[in-house]
Image (spheres, grey):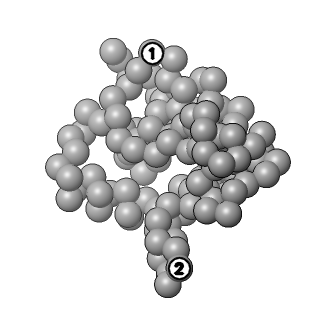
Amino acid sequence: MAVDITKELPLTITPSAFRQLMQIREEQGIGEEYGLRVGVKGGGCAGFSYLLGFDVQKENDEVFEYQGLKVFIQKAHMLYLLGTRIDWAEGLNNRGFTFDNPNAKETCGCGSSFSA
């Protein structure tokens, strides 16, 4: 499947999140044929939970590029992710990726699920 890179990324990946993603990619030996998949799925304590991981391009993906990294977002998920900010938090009580989603009407206490 040909990679057709489209317009500007509809979400923000902070520098700290990008560094962590590149570190994960290197540590796990993830090849260049894989891009970052960002999405949502039904479930979680608030209705939807976020998907973030390396994957190959699939049909119905919109393909973006961020600093040389391919980013895949399924067209159906765009509505839920538009304007979302992905960050990496490292503190005493929280270590991991965080999602600040302006489309979320409600989020759970852990920040990994939301309702729209």
Using residue 57 as the reference point, say whether residue 41 is left or right of it.
right
Q: Quadrant of the C terminus?
A: top right
* Residue located farthest toward the bottom when viewing the structure as drawn: 92
Picture residue at 61% right of the left edge, 33% below the top: 42
**Residue nearest the viewer, comparing 7 with 87:** 87
66 left or right of 21? right
**Mark in front: 2 vs 1:** 2
Badge 1: how crowded within 10 Å, few (<14), some, or many (20+)?
few
Check residue 93 in the rendering and tell me which mark sits there, or answer none: 2
Can residue 14 be seen at all in this image of the molecule? no
Q: Position of residue 72 (x, y in %)?
A: 47, 33
Q: Which image quadrant for residue 86?
A: bottom right
Residue type of the residue flagged with mark 1:
Glu
Horizontally, residue 95 falls left or right of residue 80, namely: left
Check the image and name the residue furthest to the left. 29
- Residue that appears at 61% across and 45% down: 44
Say which residue label 1 marks. Answer: 59
- Kindly indicate the quadrant of the structure image that contains residue 35: top left
Q: Earlier in the sequence, mark 2 or mark 1?
A: 1
> Nearest the camera: 110 or 105?
110
Instruction: Compute the Cα span from label 2 to label 1.
Output: 38 Å
Secondary structure beneath dot 2 equals loop
